[in-house]
Image: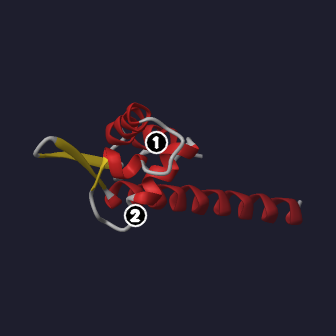
Amino acid sequence: MSVPETGFGSGDAAPVFAALGDVRRLALVSRLMDGRSRSIVQLSDGLSLTRQGVTKHLRVLENAGIVSCERVGRESRYLLQPGTLNSARNYLERVAEQWDETLGRLKAYLEDG
């Protein structure tokens, strides 16, 4: 069973899902879900992580294309890139459709055989 390579393919998916596979990075993504950019200080507020730790996790998210970083004066501000998450969702939907089709064929085979 192969996933169509149109748009967001398996090669693009792995870094995104790996980046989202950490509870601290998911917390950072949640803080950015409202579409507003935030500084490292704002993102680290209330977390049990140092600013350096938050920065490390933000770099992973940035390398996966989930957030972008912009310098504003002396601070770095991070913004969620919803297109990457939408592409990941669409990828999972395509995989789920393929599994549904495969399971449907298996069920029909077993019922007929």
Residue extending furthest left? 73
Q: Residue 23: x percent and y percent?
A: 57, 45
Q: Tag 1: Cα neighbours inside 10 Å, few (<14), some, or many (≥20)?
A: some
Q: Residue 14: x percent and y percent?
A: 48, 38
Q: At label 2, which amino acid type do we have?
A: Met
Name which residue lies at 38% across and 42% down: 61
Mark sitting earlier along the chain (1/2): 1
What's the mark number on residue 10?
A: 1
In the rendered view of the protein, which quadrant contains the C terminus?
bottom right
Q: Which quarter of the picture shows residue 32?
A: bottom left
Name which residue lies at 56% across and 41% down: 22
Asked if residue 100 lies left or right of residue 29, the reply is right
**Contact flag, marks 1 and 2 (Cβ < 8 Å):** no
Q: Residue 41: x percent and y percent?
A: 33, 46
Name which residue lies at 43% across and 58% down: 31
Q: Residue 42: x percent and y percent?
A: 35, 52
Q: Is residue 104 above or below residue 27?
A: below
What's the mark number on residue 33?
A: 2
Q: At label 1, which amino acid type do we have?
A: Ser
Q: Which quarter of the picture shows residue 52?
A: top left
**Front in this rendered view, residue 99 or 18:** 18
Q: Tag 2: Cα neighbours inside 10 Å, few (<14), some, or many (≥20)?
A: few
Name which residue lies at 77% across and 57% down: 106
SS label for mark 2: loop
Q: Measure how far apart labels 1 and 2 are at the Cα level.
A: 24 Å
